[in-house]
Image (cartoon, rainbow, N blue to C red):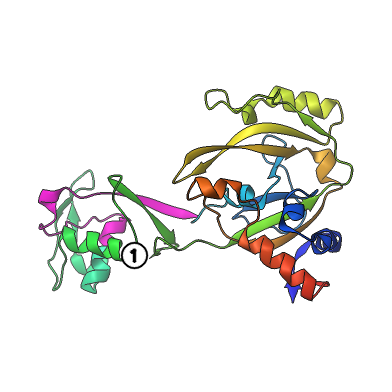
């Protein structure tokens, strides 16, 4: 059963179902928007008055964060590894890991602090770890400190494995007879002068009753850094008549140069296959 929410979602499903090849699906009239935010009700533009989309699901899903909350953990110095880990009275991720390894709560430690919140004393419980134990536990969850730090993913207060990704949404859109004004001027993106901040150009397009604007933008890949791509910003005029559906999706990561040519994510491919078997959508 294919389930979805959206406006005229059946029309989107029909476009997808009638495509015969992956290349045709990738080059078709659909636009894509990835988000962790719950999509409920009408689509709304952001603070700049634009609803940003991409013409490929891979680019759109690269904008879905792997985790809504994360914490940067610095690598311990070699001389610290054998030392007992000093807990913090605050909401400290490493202290949470240490408590988990020792099978205690932070209250069991009876931490005392000075006037600026630094730990001055604490109760030593059985099994309290050293720095090496804490670092090895994070390494067992897949985190690497090759860059001198690791970004640890959290689900509420739970520390998640490095391979985990939070479930978000892929919005698939179609706007009949869309009028797109390309304000990039044929120029590649410039990190020193990003085109998504050219708000006056957005206003000019809006005043000319354009449906959307196109710019050269950048996504951030953990492996490749800044990756240039085309972005299509839908103005309110286009959103008012947009047809769209939403499916569950997770972040797509461009892990290498070979992935840059990919335009269809596993979620979109699965939807394509499902619609061939069961054409009707279910709310």
- Residue 174 in percent (x, y) is at 81, 50
- Residue 32 in percent (x, y) is at 70, 50
Residue 179 forms part of the magenta stretch: no
Q: Is 150 above or below relative to 275?
A: above
Q: Considering the numbered disc 1 on the image, is that residue within a helix, a strand or a loop?
A: loop
Q: Dividing the image into 4 quarters, which one contains the N terminus?
A: bottom right
- Residue 228 in percent (x, y) is at 58, 36
> Is 162 positioned to the left or the right of 33 in the image?
left
> Is 256 positioned to the left or the right of 145 in the image?
right
Q: Nearer the viewer, residue 254 or 8?
A: 254
Q: Which residues are magenta?
A: 68-96
Q: Which residue is mark 1?
A: 141
Q: Nearer the viewer, residue 55 or 165?
A: 55
* Mark 1 Cα-neighbour bin, 10 Å: few <14, some 14–19, many ≥20: some
Q: Dividing the image into 4 quarters, which one contains the C terminus?
A: bottom right
Residue occupying image coordinates x 26% and y 65%: 137
- Residue 280 in percent (x, y) is at 83, 72
């Amino acid at each position: 059963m294919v389930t979805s929410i959206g406006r005229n979602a059946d029309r989107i499903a029909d476009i997808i179902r009638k495509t015969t090849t992956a290349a045709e699906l990738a080059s078709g009239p659909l636009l894509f928007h990835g988000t962790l935010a719950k999509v409920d009700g009408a689509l709304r533009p952001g603070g700049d008055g634009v609803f940003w989309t991409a013409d490929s699901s891979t680019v759109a899903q690269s904008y879905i964060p792997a985790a809504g909350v994360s914490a940067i953990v610095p690598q311990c110095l070699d001389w610290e590894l054998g030392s007992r880990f000093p807990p913090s009275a605050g909401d400290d991720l490493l202290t949470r890991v240490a408590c988990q390894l020792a099978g205690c709560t932070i209250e069991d430690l009876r931490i005392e602090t000075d006037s600026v919140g630094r730990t001055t004393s604490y109760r030593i419980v059985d099994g309290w770890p050293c720095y090496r134990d804490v670092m090895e536990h994070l390494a067992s969850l897949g985190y690497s400190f090759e860059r001198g730090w690791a970004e640890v993913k959290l689900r509420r207060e739970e520390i998640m494995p490095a391979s985990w990704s939070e479930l978000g949404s892929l919005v698939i859109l179609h706007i009949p007879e869309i009028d797109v004004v390309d304000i990039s001027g044929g120029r590649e993106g410039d990190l020193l002068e990003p085109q998504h901040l050219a708000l006056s150009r957005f206003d000019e397009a809006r005043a000319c009753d354009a449906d959307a604007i196109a710019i050269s933008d950048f996504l951030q890949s953990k492996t490749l850094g800044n990756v240039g791509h085309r972005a299509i910003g839908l103005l309110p005029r286009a959103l008012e008549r947009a047809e769209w559906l939403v499916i569950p999706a997770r972040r797509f990561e461009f892990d290498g140069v070979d992935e840059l040519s990919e335009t269809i994510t596993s979620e979109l491919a699965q939807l394509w296959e499902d619609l061939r078997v069961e054409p009707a959508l279910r709310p």
